[in-house]
Amino acid sequence: MKKISIISCILIFVNYTYARLPPVFGPEYVRAASTSEMVKTYLTPQRIIWQSDESIKLILSSERLLYKGNGQVAVNDENLFRFVSTTDLVFN
């Protein structure tokens, strides 16, 4: 009896946590939907191997590349990693 109740709890848990369509879609879309086991995985860089700007004027806030992100683009943060382009930069 204990095994049956444990199995029932597991099945109910899996049923409610399984990915579904949002509620805005009606039951008529269930047969048209397909699922995939593919997921996205983001790896945070562990270290910066090489950086060529010794003046610290052309590459700004490079240490920010090592922070774990949340997947969202942040355009209003002043401390973002930036490349600075100038017209007087000459490569030899």
Image (cartoon, rainbow, N blue to C red):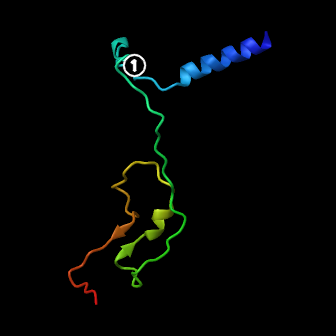
Q: Secondary structure beneath disc 1?
A: loop
> Residue shown at 39%/66% (left/top)?
81
Per the image, the residue denoted by label 1 is: 23
- Asked where in the image residue 61 lies, by quadrant, the reply is bottom left
Residue 65 higher or lower than 30, as above or below: below
The C terminus: image quadrant: bottom left
In the displayed structure, 65 sits above or below 55; it is above
The quadrant of the picture occupied by the N terminus is: top right
Place of residue 16 in the rendered image (x, y in percent of width and height, measured from the top left): 55, 20
Q: Residue at x 44, y 32 (%)?
A: 36
Image coordinates of residue 7 in percent, x first then y, are 69, 17
Q: Position of residue 10 (x, y in %)?
A: 66, 20
**Viewer-nearest residue: 88 or 38:** 38
Depth check, front residue: 86 or 30: 30
- Residue type pointed to by label 1: Pro
How crowded pointer 1 is (Cα within 10 Å; few <14, some 14-19, many 20+) is rated as: few
Residue 67 to residue 37: above or below: below
Q: How many marks?
A: 1
